[in-house]
Amino acid sequence: MTFPYKLVATDLDGTLLRADGTVSERTREALTAAASVGAAHIVVTGRSVPWTRYVLDDLGYDGLAVCGQGAQVYHAGEHRLLTSLTLDRQLAGLALSKVEAEVGPLALAASRDGLEGEVLVGPGYQVHEGPLPYVFVDDPAEMWAAPLNKVYLQHPELDDDALATAARAAVGNLVDVVMAGPGIVEILPLGLSKATGLSLAARRLGVKAADTIAFGDMPNDIPMFGWAQHGVAMANAHDALKAVAHEITASNDHDGIAVVLEELLRSGSLPAPH
């Protein structure tokens, strides 16, 4: 059995994880089969390490993971950060003031740097229910008291795409703005993306972009698709990602990753060019 890629890069939410937060047995088996013929699996997620670790542990994952939209390269087997890039808090504060001058007051949350970095949630910020821990803070100044990976934005009226577009226009070249999922618009260090983190991790693994297939579902996966040889969007993906994908597979709830990997394992060849 042969496999045309050396690296399988997967986003987590909406991609590897089903809606209930689990990884299907079929997808686990497909990733194991790809690994058995030499293809490493790397998780590339917007989540910071503390929000990613329990998923990796459940998978028995001991390799590298790219977390925090590329800010963190984490060695799961050794439970240590290999790289970590933080957001300049002064620039972020200036960027936020520019966004609020355009669209009005925002609700904020922030992800602190480090292996145990907490997610701090300010007044009015709507948190998704689920297993991910966070700390509510009454005083927004607390968010800025320690190094951060990113700041999350929400607006009482604008939807995610409209908020991301308005924020991007307002901040100019101070910071980057990404839409990473439902209700998740983020401010990041300028130039940071999943592609920058993935390229760092791939270099450590001795793997090139030409050896990589990537799976994702949101606009923050666009740079990763631009870097990888082949980008596969889930059926449930945002239209902006589908527009740049080489291929569209089944949804995260219908084993979309496994569908593609099983076909590649059967054929042993690269997909036809588009």
Image (cartoon, rainbow, N blue to C red):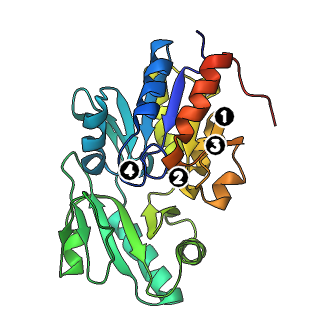
The mark lying in front, picked from 2 and 3, is 3
Give the number of the mark in front: 2 or 4.
4
78 to 85, vertically: above or below: above
- Which of the 4 image quadrants contains residue 265? top right
The mark that comes first in sequence, 2 or 3, is 2
Q: Which residue is mark 1?
A: 230
Which residue is pictured at 53% across the width and 21% down the height? 207
Mark toward the viewer: 2 or 1: 1
Q: Amino acid at mark 1?
A: His
| Residue density around tag 3, few if under 14, some if 14–19, many if 20 or more, within 10 Å | some
Task: State the mark number for residue 249.
Answer: 3
Q: Secondary structure at mark 4?
A: helix
The first of marks 2 and 1 along the sequence is: 2
Kind of residue at badge 4: Gly
For the residue pair 137 and 37, the one nearer the viewer reads as 37
Q: Left or right: 235 with respect to 194?
A: right
To which residue does mark 4 refer?
68
Q: Are marks 1 and 3 in contact (CB under 8 Å)?
A: no
Q: Residues within 10 Å of mark 2 (few under 14, many from 20)?
A: few
Circle 1 residues within 10 Å: few <14, some 14–19, many ≥20 = many
Task: Give the image location of residue 52, x and y in percent.
Answer: 31, 46
Q: Spatial distance from mark 2 to mark 3, Cα to Cα?
A: 29 Å
Find the distance from the CA under tag 1 to the CA under tag 3.
12 Å
